[in-house]
Image: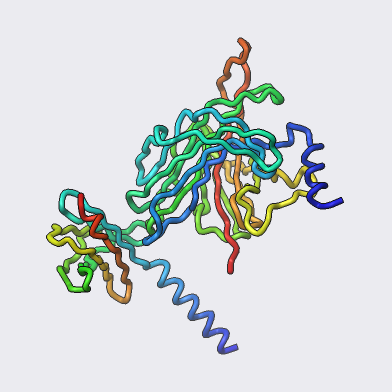
Amino acid sequence: MSTRFSTLLILLLMPAAAVAHFGVTLPSTDIIMAGDNRTLNVQVKFIHPTEGHYMEMEQPRRFGVLVRGQSHDLLPTLSATKGRGAEQQQDFHFWSADYTIQRPGDHTFFVEPAPYWEAAEDLFIVHYTKVCVHALGLEQGWNEPVGLETEIIPLTRPYGLWSGNLFSGKVLLNGKPAPHASVEVEYLNERAVNGTIHPPSAPYVTQVVTADGNGIFHYALPKAGWWGFSALSEADWTLKHDGVEKAVEIGAVYWVQARDID
Amino acid sequence: MKYLLCTVLLCVLSSGTALAHKVNIFAWVAAGTVYCETYFPDGRPVKGGQIIVLDAEDNELLTGRTDDEGLFNFKINTRSDLTIIIDASMGHRNSIILKKGDLQP
């Protein structure tokens, strides 16, 4: 049996609950230096990163960028587009925007999606998702909070990372550290470097680390490419589905890119 | 052994200097004035750094010094591409090019 086929089999046999949903906010580059093109593209998706499965994504509630302490609304720049994973039979909506860097500094792009109804888990999912793009040598701003209901604050500078580096972050819930938060980690196979990964069994698809009493977690990035971190909590509010109040899973998601040393 | 030690020492010395003291310059145009902003990676301004402005033929148009916030500005009276150099002494130098087209506010 080929590796590819056995991987597929493992993915198919896994119960739905084991497949982790991730909000994705993915820039075309995470570092812009003098002389580089200052316009980048940012894609906003809701997917299973390792399997590459897309889910239908409504227009986000908020999309913006925090730069030099100021938050800018970018929602009007988002446009709908379609895509699918290699094994999917139909297209799903995701969102995309171009953004031109105006000033030096770290740019934290953030997304608050519309709540996603997940029938299999009988709850709504809202993943607040962030990514940082560094611009023009001014390494300031990457560790500033946006002020989202829940978010990850990087403790490791989130760009210029080598594969093998330890990435550390702090999980905030309503602006305060979330003690012992569970953080899921996945590799973005559709942007894989030097070949996609083929998890030999379900536990390899989604890595899990637990934060300490101060909400601080660590993970060593084992391969070049984009890695997503998702800290999940239950919201202290509910939403109605078919007239019945349902729980809302809120996620603090952060994406970083690692490169191989050469 | 001696060679190895020298190499290590060189790496330690050079990386520390290059990274911690790398100077940067950014410039933009508004209403006929070029605004320059100079900074180290951690956000500290380059105070009193020398600014040199060259035209497309490398003729020196003007020089000046950044203020305590690392800022310097000047009026444009040319239609040439501009090279703006920040020289923070001790070889800490960087530059930015403003294209002719960028000079239209």
Choose between A254 and A194: the one closer to the eye: A194
Question: In the image, A7: left or right of A83?
Answer: right
For the view shown, which residue lies furthest in the bottom direction? Answer: B2
For the view shown, which residue lies furthest in the right direction? Answer: A1
For the view shown, which residue lies furthest in the top direction? Answer: A243
Q: Residue at x 31, y 76 (%)?
A: B90
Answer with the quarter of the image where residue A147 lies: top left
Choose between A164 and A74: the one closer to the eye: A74
Residue B16 image offset from top left, x and y in percent: 44, 71
Above or below for A180 versus B48? above
Q: Which quarter of the rendering shows the C terminus of chain A?
A: bottom right
Q: What sort of colour scheme is used for the picture?
A: rainbow
Above or below for A204 versus B25? above
Choose between A174 and A80: the one closer to the eye: A80
Answer with the quarter of the image where residue B37 lies: bottom left
Residue A54 image offset from top left, x and y in percent: 63, 36
Q: Residue at x 15, y 68 (%)?
A: B62
Residue A157 image offset from top left, x and y in percent: 49, 54
Residue B40 image offset from top left, x and y in percent: 35, 62
Q: Residue at x 37, y 61 (%)?
A: A34
Above or below for A154 versus B64? above
Q: How many marks?
A: 0
Q: Residue at x 74, y 36 (%)?
A: A18
Answer with the quarter of the image where residue B35 lies: bottom left
In this view of the protein, can residue A182 be seen by the observer? Answer: no
In this view of the protein, can residue A31 be seen by the observer? Answer: yes
